[in-house]
Image: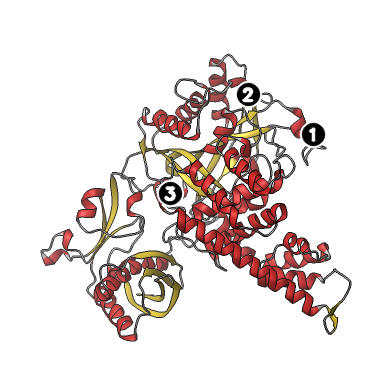
Amino acid sequence: MLSASDIVKKYISFFEARGHKQIANAPLVPINDPTTLFTSSGMQPLVPYLLGEKHQQGTRLVNIQNSFRAQDIEEVGDNRHTTFFRMMGNWSLGDYFKKEQLPWIFEFLTDKEVGLGLDPKRLYVTVFAGNNQIPKDTESIEIWKEVFSKAGIDAKEGERIFSYDVEKNWWSRSGVPEKMPTGEPGGPDSEVFYDFEDESIHTKSPWKNDSCHVNCDCGRYIEIANSVFMQYQKQPDGSFKELPKRNVDFGGGLERFLLVTEHQQDVFQTSLFSPIIKKIEEITSSPYGKSTNAMRIIADHLVAAVFIINAGVEPSKTEQGYILRRLIRRSYDNIMKLHGENILPTYRIFEAIVEQYKNTDPELVKNYEKIKNTILEEANTYKITVSRAKKFIDTKYKKTGDELMGVKEISAEDAFTLYTTQGLSPAQIESLGYSFDKQAFAQKMEEHQKISKAGADKKFRGGLADHSERTIMGHTATHLLHQALRDVLGKQVHQTGSNITTERVRFDFNYDKRLTDVQIKQVEDIVNQKIKANLPVHFELIDTKEAHKMGAIGLFMDTYGDKSKIYFIGPSTSSGLKKEDAYSIEFCGGPHVDFTGVLKSVKIIRQENLGKNQKRIYAIVQGN
């Protein structure tokens, strides 16, 4: 039986044999991209190349990308959804297209020697039905008919091949065409589904009263592969034009490949997750079959938490830290429901997770103590929060003296206050023994979500990276700030994070003291001197080892491939200096301005202490 590691090796080898170069796994927390909290797909870091920029490793690429989708948190609990997953991807950047991609994917899925060896009779495919702007994908239909025919299957439309609208068979990071921002690429896709051939799955599902179909949500058919044909770009008037070069963007979840290879209907019972589930059973003294939903949530959320902490995130009230906190607390909601309040033994679940993933992600072993301590500290904080909640309720509902009212029901307003101020979920509030009007609570939640929805949707879903003029200036400003901080504070200083918007630049770095007013002024002066000098900014594709020798700095330097994109600021062409003498040499994907003079000035407006020798500064960039 194939293991997860076996599938990874087979997939990479399959596409390398067809001229693809393996690219590095991009960071789970994107660098300098304020439009999204996490890397949610393999294509996310490749948007510039899908739009036409030349990739340093060629036109045929393959990789395995660690991904996280916050919008799937509420879906976890069924037989197939996970928030964290490994996306297996291959790309054609203006090279091959449908006639190569679809037969290759079918071969990988069905061939026993080079692929997964699935029974082709269990496979069904879907294509784009077309709309008033973009035609039906008849080309893919004809290719699929031929592919299945070679496998001895008469693939008819409506029996083996099915057409769906934009809700099912159109792909962009923002969803359907009308939700796509101007400039975003997208296109029709063709999905492959595996049929478990078990009608009871549908009859036991929430969709049992509807007719089952290939793209049904009941779980009988599992989507395992999606070939996106990136050939269109959204225009300012809402229309679509074809990209100069047509691209292929394929994604297939490793966890689902393992699911169907083992012919296991429950992803949490595959060889990847089952040891984690067994550890949860041991700790809680409860069988999986009796606590299925709770154990799926625990396993998924703690796996995601392990990887998010490994990416450098700490629990907090905002952004990535908020998602991490939500995952940990929701997992402990379910742990305490099964096991009580003794959380210490749960570290054995983290051990099981690291053991399962260490072959593909060895850095988890190195960072295990940090991961364990972060989760346990947050769990303990959560216990204190629960205690405060009890005190809040008891104090508010006291009758006289120390006598408490007999009723256990609290107002929806108070329940919502506990949710928004203490982070207590409705399930946790109920577990404390308090009842409230769920409909009134839901209405308050809906009002709350409407207020935050516009910004949150964009971040949680993952939109197109902002390439506006002011944001591009912000990218260049971070390079100048990075080097200026090293000039003033020492070469041991390095960037640990950043966030760039059209309004300001946020820059995180390691340092053990608060910057003095004199130091801030020194950093500003250096940056503004380099702006005044109007130094040229350019990038080159350089051997990664050579870039290190050259002194290139930047986040996640060890995640790049054989060649890296290195941005140089300076020296001026008239100075006679070599590129090695540039003021700033940094690993970066871009984009940047052509000359520093495009930035009129940079002003540091405040600093924050992030704890554990971590500092943050905010700066405003003025442009010409």
Looking at the image, is 615 positioned above or below residue 253? below
Mark 3 or mark 1: which is in front? Answer: 3
Report the residue marked by disc 1: 203
95 left or right of 332 in image: left
Q: Where residue 263 sits in the image (x, y, percent)?
A: 62, 28
Q: Do the residues labelled 3 and 1 touch (CB within 8 Å)?
A: no
Q: Nearer the viewer, residue 455 or 39?
A: 39
421 left or right of 571 in image: right
Which quadrant of the view contains residue 140? Answer: top right
Q: How many other residues sit within 10 Å of disc 1, few (<14), some (14-19) or many (≥20)?
A: some
Q: Where residue 323 sits in the image (x, y, percent)?
A: 57, 60
Q: Nearer the viewer, residue 513 or 230?
A: 513
Q: Can residue 41 be spotted in the picture?
A: no
Q: Distance between the residues labelled 3 and 1?
A: 43 Å
Mark found first going from the N terminus, 3 or 1: 1
Residue at point 58%, 39% (across, down): 275
Q: Where residue 384 sits in the image (x, y, percent)?
A: 64, 70
Amino acid type, mark 1: Thr
Report the residue marked by disc 2: 122
Report the residue marked by disc 3: 365
Q: Nearer the viewer, residue 536 or 616?
A: 616
Secondary structure category for the residue under label 1:
helix
Q: Do the residues labelled 3 and 2 touch (CB within 8 Å)?
A: no
Q: How many other residues sit within 10 Å of disc 3, few (<14), some (14-19) or many (≥20)?
A: some
Which quadrant of the view contains residue 22? Answer: top left
Indicate which disc residue 554 carries. Answer: none
Mark found first going from the N terminus, 1 or 2: 2
Q: How far apart are marks 3 and 2 (CA)?
A: 38 Å
195 left or right of 533 in image: right
Secondary structure category for the residue under label 3:
helix
